[in-house]
Image: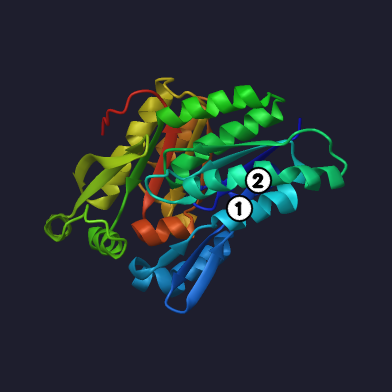
Amino acid sequence: MRIGLVVDSACDLPKAFLDQHNFTILPITVRIGEAVLADHRDEQATLEFLHSHVATRGHEAETMPFTVQQIHDLFLGRLVIDYDYVFCMTITKTRSPIFDNASQASFSILNDYRPIRAAAGHDTPFALRVIDTQNLFAAQGVLAVEAARLVAAGEGAPKIRARLEHLALHTQGYLIPPDLYYLRNRARTKGDRSVGLLSAALGTALDIKPVLHCNRGETGPAAKIKGFEPAVQKTLEHVARRVEAGDLLTPTVCMSYGGELEELHRLPGYENLRAACRANNVEFFESVMSLTGMVNVGKGAVVVGFAAEGQKFSG
């Protein structure tokens, strides 16, 4: 069985990995004023857009994910011919309509694919599964990496589906935003009142940074730490301890940064986490954060994800 993999462009993984495993990207288009970029996981284009537009006006951005019709057309134009079964893994449905759009599109895809496959010489059924990763950005990558491993190992679709749905429940994503004012302004632009002016002002005045935790689609503060770099360090130390304890359900840690990766490498805790992963045979993936991620959480934000049971932050 030919199994294909689809992710949206908010899934933070290196483009080389996505290309190696033939991932199809559902691009998310970002508009800031007159500037428009469809995010296809091109890190150079993302960084250029960041430096030109996001740093000053990113909170005003409009993000436009693939519509139901665009997803339908993508599948019928290529995927129903190239594959027999496709897993489409999306950013959490609590933060984006991509999961709902893909789910809605799946009904018409399964109704319309037969003549297209027949014309291409395929007389077998086509199937697809839309999976809500229930997480964001780098943490989405945990499921995508495991899916690629299972496909490469020749596992069947039922086993892959069960494994991914289980991991989605236990993927832990941690986000450290550097600028609470930016986060507040972005939230207000989207109609989200979860970051109030008072908390943003107090956090900025006292240099208090929240460590935000995402699991099962819910995002909330895991800790509040004075200073951005100490917050990053304590978060990465927490992840390193989970790695060293053998807690991970899959040998994967994914990390993304809202800027040049050289800046990420200089942050405290980064080298210790890399060393912990190497010592425990855990694969470490790092990438420039998606354009969607950066306009939502700000330039310089750090995200790290892994799969493990238990959510208690021990920073």
In percent of width and height, residue 75 lies at 68, 49
Instruction: Decide: few, some or many residues near mark 2? Use Cα within 10 Å; few <14, some 14-19, many ≥20.
Output: many
115 above or below 296? above
Q: Which quadrant does the N terminus fall into?
A: top right
Q: Amino acid at mark 2?
A: Ile
Q: Amino acid at mark 1?
A: Ile
Residue occupying the far front of the picture: 111
Nearest to the observer: residue 17 or residue 217: 217
Q: What residue do we see at 41% from left, 28% from top?
A: 170
Residue occupying the far bottom of the picture: 34
Residue occupying the far top of the picture: 246
Query: Gap between marks 1 and 2, in whole Å?
Result: 9 Å
257 above or below 126? below
To which residue does mark 1 refer?
71
Circle 1 SS class: helix
Q: What residue do we see at 56% from left, 59% from top?
A: 43
Badge 1 vs badge 2, beta-carbon distance below 8 Å: yes
User: Is 220 situated left or right of 90 in this image?
Assistant: left
Residue 255 seen in render: no
Per the rendering, the mark at residue 109 is 2
Quarter where residue 187 is shown: bottom left
User: Is 118 situated left or right of 258 in this image?
Assistant: right
Q: Which quadrant does the C terminus fall into?
A: top left
Nearest to the observer: residue 154 or residue 156: 156
